[in-house]
Image (cartoon, grey):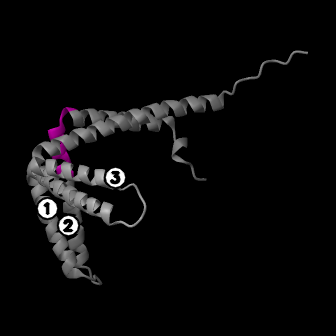
Amino acid sequence: MERDWMNISWQSLVVRGAVGIVFGILAMVWPTSTAIALALLFGFWALVDGVGSLAQAFQKDATGRVWLAVMGVIALIAAFFAIFSPAVTAVALTWILGIWLVVRGIFELVGAFASSTQMPRWLLVVGGLLSIVLGVLFAANPGRAAVALAFWLGLIALAWGIAFVVLGIVVRSEQGHLQHPATPPPATA
């Protein structure tokens, strides 16, 4: 029998919410450490990905060995830099994000005026301009942007944590109402 996610235990929701709240507060209090920790996580992920790609490249029936080996080596190089220099990696990733946002914004602006479908073009224009502005801000000062992203991640985690705690309390309240239905008043004759 499949259960939807709203039917899980209220305790699970409250615990998930509490973890989100704690993570959010820690990320907002120490955004630089959070950015560095995220760069380290990226580094370990790249390490596992690189080793996996290289292992796959040298399997007996592997196709695309050269591409797998090249991707494995690139992932290992990225992992090396991310693990041994996470602050620089956080800045570099933010700089890359800034460039991506600028390119995306340009494509959104072009798409706003090149599309033949009827849609509110101003939304694409606003989205494109916002992407370009954020991209320029990220690329111009990637160190601050990495810290700001870590802070915003913490703020989002805090909000989600609060939402899950409230949801857990609501689910518990609803379960209590289902277990103890209101008894009808006695009939008078």
Determine the secondary structure under disc 2. Answer: helix
Please tell me whether residue 49 is drawn above or below residue 152 in the rendered image: below
| Residue 180, position as x, y percentages in the image | 66, 27
Residue plotted at (12% across, 48% down) = 142
Please tell me whether residue 10 is drawn above or below residue 182 in the rendered image: below
Q: Residues within 10 Å of mark 1 (few under 14, many from 20)?
A: some
Residue plotted at (18% across, 70% down) = 72
- In terms of sequence position, does the residue under pointer 1 or pointer 3 come before the other? 1
Residue 33 is one of the magenta-drawn residues = yes
Res 7 → quadrant:
top right
**Residue marked by disc 2:** 50
Type of amino acid at the residue the image marks with label 1: Ala
| Residue 75, position as x, y percentages in the image | 17, 65
The label nearer to you, 1 versus 3, is 3
Measure the C-alpha gap from mark 2 to mark 3.
43 Å
Type of amino acid at the residue the image marks with label 2: Gly
**Residue marked by disc 1:** 78
Please tell me whether residue 118 is drawn above or below residue 179 in the rendered image: below
| Residue 108, position as x, y percentages in the image | 28, 59
Res 29 → quadrant:
top left
The label nearer to you, 2 versus 3, is 3
| Residue 120, position as x, y percentages in the image | 39, 54
